[in-house]
Amino acid sequence: MSAILTPIPPLRLGVNVDHVATVRNARGGALPDPVRAALLAAAAGADGITAHLREDRRHIRDADMRRLRAEIPVPLNFEMAATEEMTALALELRPHACCLVPERREERTTEGGLDVIGGGIELAHRVETLAAAGIRVSLFVAPDAEQIARSADIGAAVVELHTGAWCEWLAEGRAAEAHEEFARLAQAATQAAALGLEVHAGHGLDYASAQEIAALVEIRELNIGHFLIGEAMFEGLETAIRRMRHAMAHGRAVLRAA
Ligand code: PXP
């Protein structure tokens, strides 16, 4: 009875356009344009756009971030390291949200969650500064109870749960490890929501994993990039986004049937 009466919160899709810039930068020049991809993604049903301005500018550049802020019709999620330089830029651009991530130059992508506990007072101060400017602050964390508790303590509005390990184990057929990690993600989502945090998830998601994780009712947003941009080469960005939305809706529908 209660399952029928309780409305199921919608699940938003944030599309990360970093890797359009990766392809552009492989050749120099201006094409393909990540802002064009963002506009197309929004038209195809993305609820938001994410871009990560890395310290080494390996994909998105400052000018891309400025154009995204000025040109896209949906909320911009500015993914960034918790540094002085990035905080200053965020305060200038005032995006809808900032997602603070750990960053190491030698990594290929964001490999682990943010150490919110180790970030101490300095991280707490950055969260406070960004939030005071009206920016929704999200912390990209592993599904770890202590990191999540500390995220709430320092005033983050959102935690984004790192799904990278789960997706990797799924892809490698390591079913038992994937199963355990999914249980950790589910528990982390419940804990974070109980602490009043909005829960997002992302990293490494594809159609199948997005569908599966969509069944976690506390999760309100998925941020997906690499897979969608890859699929766009074969079936077009618009189709890839439509298929992703379909997969997410399918995963959410499990809740309705429960
Ligand atoms: N969320 C965060 C915080 C990320 O760092 C990334 C990778 O840039 C993503 C989501 C998207 O991951 P992927 O490109 O693997 O879909």
Image (spheres, grey):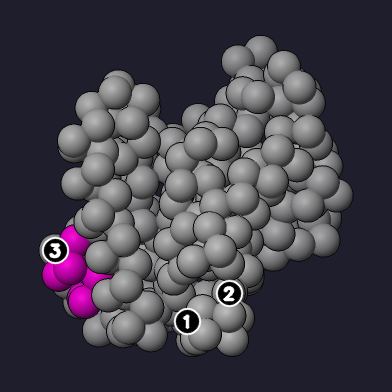
Numbered label attached to residue 8: 2
3D distance between C-alphas at marks 1 and 2: 28 Å
Q: Is residue 49 left or right of residue 45?
A: left
Judging depth in this view, the residue of 217 and 55 nearest the camera is 217
3D distance between C-alphas at marks 3 and 1: 20 Å
Q: In the picture, residue 203 is in which quadrant?
A: top left
Please state which amino acid type lies under the numbered disc 2: Ile
Residue 68, given in percent of the width and then of the height, sits at 73, 52
Mark closest to the chain's N terminus, 3 or 2 = 2
Name the residue at 17% across, 68% down: 145
The answer to whether residue 50 of the structure is visible from this angle is no
Judging depth in this view, the residue of 96 and 202 nearest the camera is 202
Residue bearing the label numbered 3: 118
Residue bearing the label numbered 1: 131
The answer to whether residue 131 of the structure is visible from this angle is yes
Numbered label attached to residue 161: none
Badge 3: few (under 14), some or many (20 or more) residues near its Cα, within 10 Å?
Answer: few
Residue 117, given in percent of the width and then of the height, sits at 15, 68
Please state which amino acid type lies under the numbered disc 1: Ala
